[in-house]
Image (spheres, rainbow, N blue to C red):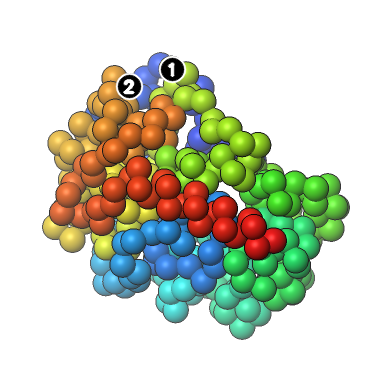
Amino acid sequence: MKKLSERDQDQYSTDRVSDFYKVDVGLPKNMMVELSNACNHACIFCANPHMTRKAKRISGELLYRVMQEARQEGVDEIGFYTTGDPFIHKDLDKFTLRAKELGFRYVYISTNGALATPDRAKVVIDAGMDSIKFSINAGSRETYKLIHGEDDWDAVIMHLKFISEYRKSLARPMALFVTCVITNPMRHEVDAFRTFITPYVDEVTFVECGIQSGQMTSAQALLSGGTTPPALNDSICPMPFNRLHITCEGYLTLCCVDYQNYLTVADLKHQSIREAWDSEPARDARRRHIDRDLAGILCGNCWQGRIDQIQPLNLDHATVVDFPEFYAKTANKTTIRLQLK
């Protein structure tokens, strides 16, 4: 089983063969499904607490149909999360079991871990979960409460230790990872946290606080060195080309962190996976990435470092916000939380 860092390199690297970026690219092998856009935490670097899209949970009937279509098309990896926490959905274990019954080779989740109690984690693991990634973004209880917005440090560490021990009883491999977003309030804890957490997991990775696909640009400047990241030169984002992203409403979107549904290109309640991937809106979105024509959409604010007023690709799917105002509000709320430290 690959390490998390190896999987991230496979998924997010912009160093691709010449024919990777095509308008009519084949259906990806990997699919991520937003079981819910709700989250029980309010991480200081994350756009989820600022999201104005209504919190929902995906329909089991819709998800089962989409999973079956995806497997028939050759998709063999499925992640049950994007913008929210997967344990929000009470049927995570049932979805995992069905995915394995359909033949998905690799089923994975990322969670803050607070809801991954021994009882719930056990049934999800027993259903066939291949990989669980904990997002733990601090190295102490005090800093954790500031970063995550909840005093769940003790519970999360207990849940992680339970899973670390329980997986030893399995007759198959199951990966356990930890990721940590580095922000200024916890930067001094990185080395100690790495030493503390490494014995329980296969790998722990650290990543510098980012702009959440162009949705936390102003807040990021307060959390990570005081500067926003530069535009990514002449590279092209791989995500519209090598992974399917399904929202809890059943939309196909270009991105795994599309909090306001600004990048949806099809409605899977009315189209098959294949029809959605090959639809003209999806093809046009890939064409715009190839042509670097991203001004005026969320991808431009992410990949090109813009802070423009932007419009959704499909107005009927999106929860529209004034983005300059959104940036100002996220920065103001972040400032207040940092002052409360």
Label 1 vs label 2: CA separation?
8 Å
* 103 in relation to 5, above or below: below
Q: How many tags in the picture?
A: 2
Residue in view at x 32 percent, y 57 percent: 247
Please state the horizontal and vertical placement of residue 251, each as a whole percent of the image.
25, 55
Q: Nearer the viewer, residue 341 or 69?
A: 341
Please state the horizontal and vertical placement of residue 236, each as a whole percent of the image.
41, 25
Rendering quarter of residue 196: bottom right
Marks 1,2: beta carbons within 8 A: yes
Amino acid type for the residue under numbered disc 1: Asp
Q: Is residue 45 visible?
A: yes
Using residue 11 as the reference point, say whether residue 173 is left or right of it: right
Please state the horizontal and vertical placement of residue 332, each as a whole percent of the image.
49, 53
The numbered mark, 1 or 2, whose residue comes first in the sequence reads 1
Q: Nearer the viewer, residue 249 or 28?
A: 249
Q: Nearer the viewer, residue 167 or 83?
A: 83
Rendering quarter of residue 223: top right
The image quadrant where one finds the C terminus is bottom right
Residue in view at x 43 percent, y 53 percent: 329
Q: Which residue is mark 1?
A: 234
Residue in view at x 47 percent, y 40 percent: 217
Q: Which residue is mark 2?
A: 292
Q: Is residue 30 visible?
A: no
Amino acid type for the residue under numbered disc 2: Arg
Please state the horizontal and vertical placement of residue 24, each as a whole percent of the image.
24, 29
Label 2 element class? loop
Label 1 element class? loop
* 322 in relation to 249, above or below: above
